[in-house]
Amino acid sequence: MTEMASHILPTYPRSGVTPARGEGVYLIDEQDRRYLDFTSGIAVNALGHAHPHLVRAVQDQASKLWHVSNLFNIPGQEQLASRICGASFAEYVFFCNSGAEALEAAIKMARRYHFVKGNPERNRIITFTGAFHGRTLATIAAGGQEKYLEGFEPRLPGFDQVAFGDHEALKQAITHETAAVLVEPVQGEGGVRAVPSFCLTGLRELCDEHGILLIADEVQCGIMRTGKFLAHQHAGMAPDIATIAKGIGGGFPLGACLATKEAASGMAFGSHGSTFGGNPLAMAVGNALLDVVLDPSFFEHVDHVATYLEDGLKKLALRHQEKIIELRGAGLMRGIKLADHVVARDVLHACAEESLLVCTAADNVLRLLPPLIIEPSHVDEALHVIDGVIARA
């Protein structure tokens, strides 16, 4: 019998694993094989798979109301926005469905801010090499990576990219047309590169000096991924705008753009919108997730396990000094930069053969994004596999 061709657009390099269900930190495939999941859906499944509190929230809300559109009041939005603002710098929240949509809102907000101030020429945004901000035409232009831009010219204007970590180039890039600086406190796709706290503080001061906005892309590194509700909080500073997604929905499509009242002052009625954004079902899930992650004991748990993982990775690096070049990241967002002769994607496949699922990132980095609910025993299990795979590489 001839196998039927897939009708799925071939834009993803699929692995050989076909998950059928999930239980906490484990994925189970169609043959009932269990995999320790250190991808968490690319930093999405913050509470692992089928978390009982999230399941109950979905079931309860699904029996009442899924969608009404933003033509009506949605109490869950007010509740979730209030809780997000209480845990962050923000005073306003705009709900959407993804990280890319949150970035689109942030870009529009930054441009609109200067427009209503009487400076429409201030519409350019500075970004950094290695950045990844999404797959829309605006966000691939912001990211500036040729592999995502190829074939989609003309590239959307309005973005000026500087080298990651080049402070002088950043200063020189600021002109009378600059509206904002956009930065990931920890680059995910770009190689799990964390921006040092003093650099984030310096960015804040530089933006204040020039009267421009600072946008933090927290889509991957936010929602307790690095041990703080938002990653920039490690630096004791605050942006004007931030974007979140991934972890805030625990697996349900949910994104948001956070802002101060000042940064959002240009966003009037009709300036932006989303049909599905902030629907009752998404709000129920987001609020249920915050029930868990905003509990002080959960902060303590993430901090404890993250420290345990960091210590284990350091020991791993010492055992494989000729193969592990650098350890990167923070909290439960970690990267292992491998030597050129050890290919990260090969390590990924070898780990999967031993029932461990991991990610890769740019710069030949093995990326670890476990659910935030992992225990030290899961760390031991994962590092044992990685240790053996790298030893044989």
Image (cartoon, grey):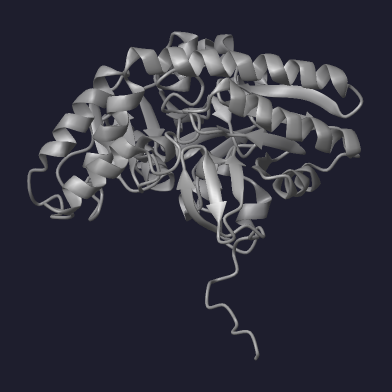
Asked if residue 259 shows in the view, the reply is: no
Q: Position of residue 234 (x, y in %)?
A: 49, 12
In the rendered image, the residue lying farthest to the left is 72
Location of the N terminus by quadrant is bottom right
367 and 273: which one is in front? 367
Q: Residue at x 50, y 10 (%)?
A: 201
264 and 245: which one is in front? 245
Q: Position of residue 187 (x, y in %)?
A: 59, 31
Q: Residue at x 60, y 28 (%)?
A: 378
Asked if residue 357 shows in the view, the reply is: yes
* 135 lies left or right of 161: left
Q: Position of residue 335 (x, y in %)?
A: 68, 29
100 and 6: which one is in front? 6
Q: Residue at x 42, y 43 (%)?
A: 99
Residue 282, located in which quarter of the rendered image?
A: top left
What count of labels does the image hold? Answer: 0
Q: Position of residue 37 (x, y in %)?
A: 58, 41
Q: Residue at x 41, y 27 (%)?
A: 223
Question: As displayed, is residue 296 above or below residue 144?
Answer: above
In the rendered image, the residue lying farthest to the front is 32
Question: As displayed, is residue 314 above or below residue 286?
Answer: above
Residue 188, located in which quarter of the rendered image?
A: top right
* 179 lies left or right of 347: left
* 240 lies left or right of 330: left
Location of the C terminus by quadrant is top right
